[in-house]
Image: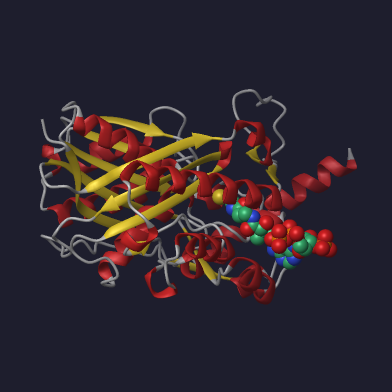
């Protein structure tokens, strides 16, 4: 039995339409200055295609980096809270579109923590010999579920996907330790109030986003702190052993706090929130992919990751990168533009939601 789940492939997919903070300020009472200083976000991507398409491109790039054929996969696991449909899952669309017909395929929803949750369980499955070659994807089209009239939350999120291939290995590598939890007492502080328990026949088009930013912030700090301490204790590693910090990208201030706690200097902390905002389950694999591309992650590096999200789910992991930091085949496939701008895609949603709120107010 192989003891490790080495990361052999990495890939990403960012939709081409870019929405800047100034674009947002054309229809929301907000400003570039507020968004930048409170969150670190400068722009985000808006997808014209569904989550499964983003996931498939990211997955194909990760397979290319690993030099694997899709038919060799035995599991595809997609972390997402924005599936194209309720049934069937996103993972089955990825399985079909990649042509990996022997792979089991399922989705996992731990909101923004989904990718680390996925790594945690996929690594255990590889260690027990149940699976050998796993594709994990974090993919989201959050711009379709946001309430574009709520500035508190609308400015924070974006679309995208990232992926990794994990393969059974004898070399000490991959997720060496991980800890995942859920602070369910706070499950209502980050909630999209729409689903099967709601009256679909009386649905007026409003999907209210419960979002208590400061409470999420406080609980996220506490949860990630505890999770990071646990993975250090489990491995016996200390902050001195860490080469870089690759965290969930929800707020730059939160990442700065984490970096201070882990004593990781700025140049070794991976931050790309300025370009993509919070892409939920996709932030972690996109950040890993870019860290490898930019040479921040070097062969044999030890990396600490921490995540949190709706639930409130939380987790941390210590990851050891393998010896290869170059893709075996080119992993730079991108999505073609449909010609629509980010505002072309979002303004109709904003207008419809605004009218729905006005109608509700008048009743
Ligand atoms: C969301 C978050 C950035 C808000 O920052 P904050 O400093 O806590 O800001 P507050 O919510 O206290 O709002 C401060 C003021 O800005 C206003 N404001 C909120 N959103 C705004 C926006 N987009 N533009 C301009 N002003 C805004 C508020 O109305 C408030 O005004 P008031 O003081 O007149 O009442 C921050 O709480 C956060 O990062 N939370 C954790 C991250 C997170 O939740 N991520 C999603 C889950 S993974």
**In the image: residue 33, left or right of residue 110:** right
The answer to which image quadrant residue 102 occupies is top left
Q: Say above or below: 354 vs 128.
A: below
Q: Quadrant of ligand 1?
A: bottom right
Nearest the camera: 12 or 295? 295
Q: Quadrant of residue 250?
A: bottom right
Quadrant, the C terminus: top right
Q: Is residue 259 left or right of residue 192?
A: left
Is residue 335 something one can see in this rendering? no
Can you give x and y, in whole percent of width and height, for residue 336 in the image? 33, 63
Specify the color scheme: secondary structure
Quadrant of the rendering where the N terminus is positioned: top left
Q: Position of residue 223 (x, y in %)?
A: 55, 44
Which residue sits at x=27%, y=44%?
176
* Left or right of 359 on screen, residue 4: left
Query: In the displayed image of the protein, which residue is found farthest to the right?
Result: 362
Whether residue 101 is visible here, answered yes or no, is yes
Q: Nearer the viewer, residue 12 or 349?
A: 12
Residue positioned 24% across, 42% down in the render: 135
Foreground: 228 or 271? 228
Residue at 69% x, 32% y is: 203
Question: For this rendering, which residue is in front, 351 or 242?
Answer: 242
């Amino acid at each position: 039995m192989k003891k490790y789940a080495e990361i052999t492939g990495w890939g990403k997919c960012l939709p081409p339409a870019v929405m800047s903070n100034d674009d947002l300020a054309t229809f929301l009472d907000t400003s570039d200055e507020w968004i930048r200083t409170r969150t670190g976000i400068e722009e985000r991507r808006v997808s014209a295609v569904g989550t499964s398409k983003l996931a498939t491109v990211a997955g194909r790039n990760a397979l290319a980096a690993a030099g694997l054929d899709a038919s060799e996969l035995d599991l595809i696991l997609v972390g997402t809270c924005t599936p194209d449909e309720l049934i069937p899952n996103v993972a089955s669309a990825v399985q079909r579109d990649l042509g990996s017909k022997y792979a089991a395929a399922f989705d996992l929803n731990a909101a923004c923590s989904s990718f680390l949750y996925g790594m945690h369980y996929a690594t255990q499955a590889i260690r027990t010999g149940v699976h050998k070659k796993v594709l994990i994807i974090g993919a989201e089209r959050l711009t379709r579920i946001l309430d574009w009239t709520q500035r508190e939350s609308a400015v924070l999120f974006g679309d995208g996907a990232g992926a990794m291939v994990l393969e059974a290995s004898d070399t000490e590598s991959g997720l060496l330790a991980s800890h995942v939890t859920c602070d369910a007492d706070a499950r209502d502080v980050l909630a999209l109030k729409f689903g099967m328990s709601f009256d679909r026949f009386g649905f007026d088009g409003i999907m209210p986003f419960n979002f208590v930013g400061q409470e999420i912030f406080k609980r996220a700090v506490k949860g990630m702190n505890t999770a990071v301490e646990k993975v250090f204790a489990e491995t016996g590693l200390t902050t001195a052993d860490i080469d870089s910090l690759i965290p969930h990208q929800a707020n730059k201030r939160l990442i700065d706090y984490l970096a201070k706690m882990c004593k990781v200097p700025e140049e070794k902390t991976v931050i790309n929130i300025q370009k993509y905002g919070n892409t939920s389950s996709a932030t972690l694999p996109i950040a890993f992919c870019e860290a490898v591309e930019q040479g921040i992650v070097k062969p044999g590096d030890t990396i600490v990751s921490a995540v949190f999200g709706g639930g409130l789910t939380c987790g941390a992991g210590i990851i050891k990168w393998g010896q290869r930091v170059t893709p075996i085949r080119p992993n730079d496939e991108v999505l073609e533009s449909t010609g629509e701008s980010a505002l072309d895609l979002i303004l109709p949603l904003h207008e419809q939601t605004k009218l729905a709120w006005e109608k509700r107010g008048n009743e």
